[in-house]
Image (spheres, rainbow, N blue to C red):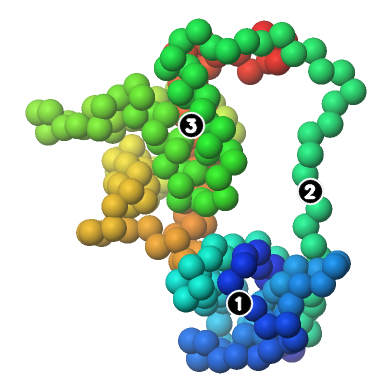
Amino acid sequence: MVRYLNVGISGEADWPEEETKIMFGGHELILRPATKDTEQSVHIALKGISDVEALTLINRFLSVLAWCDDQGMENLYGWSGNPVPVSVPRRSRSIGSSIAFPFYRDIEADPKARLALALYREARTINSVPFEFLSYFKILNMFWKDRSQNHKNELVEGLRDALSRIHDDEAVRRIDALRKQHSDVAAYLYESGRCAVAHAHSDPIVDPDDVSDLRRLSEDMWVIKAVAEFLIENELHVSRSIIG
């Protein structure tokens, strides 16, 4: 039985006002317009293509639209398994809610702490896995310079030392998995994460359309986020309580 992948799309590039079928990359994409209850969406039969390959193909399609119309086009993702295409429900707005709000904090006196919190908010807010990863890495860069001396990179050395001090369960799980694949986890995170996102002139390179790259970075994110949080809490002494 054929399974369909149903993916919501956000963006202002040209989009059909009626359900439309197109061929792209050798596969049929079904495009549906937005309604008051559903997002505009793309649907593809997972026949001869995996879900990762299909999501990457959709990203490639959105990149063409973004280029042609000079508009952002965001893959909202979705689900697979339906025997027919199913429209994607419109997203609800996420808001915080608290009956009591005992907030007794003030602007951080340390400029370094203010910058670290700004970069942390950027990382938690930006809707891009590669740039979220890079924002966390920039927090690390505040403590260790990205420069080599005597064949050692200060940023990599600092990260290597910090890995042994991390206790977040998901981060530790990922570190253990990476140690089975890489002899130097810190160097891997620097080269295949930080450098691969920041540069596009030589391998390794992170392709933001390639879902296999995004999934790998999402797993590595647990580690870099945990290190950034450790530095903010333990080196800059910034409390995580709104009370103070």
SS for dot 1: loop
Is residue 170 something one can see in this rendering? no
Q: Mark 2 to mark 3: distance in Å?
A: 24 Å
The answer to which of 107 and 218 lies nearer the viewer is: 107
| Residue where numbered disc 3 is placed | 119
* Rendered image: mark on residue 80: none
The residue sitting at 51% across, 28% down in the picture is: 118
Work out whether residue 80 or residue 91 is closer to the camera in this orientation and state it: 91
Task: Check whether the beta carbons of the residues at disc 3 and disc 1 lie within 8 A of each other.
Answer: no
Relative to residue 228, is residue 91 drawn left or right?
Answer: right
Q: Amino acid at mark 1?
A: Asp
Figure quadrant of the C terminus: top right
Residue sitting nearer the eye, 41 or 43: 41
**Disc 1 versus disc 2: distance between alpha carbons?**
24 Å
In the image, residue 33 above or below residue 234: below
Please give the label number shown on residue 93: 2
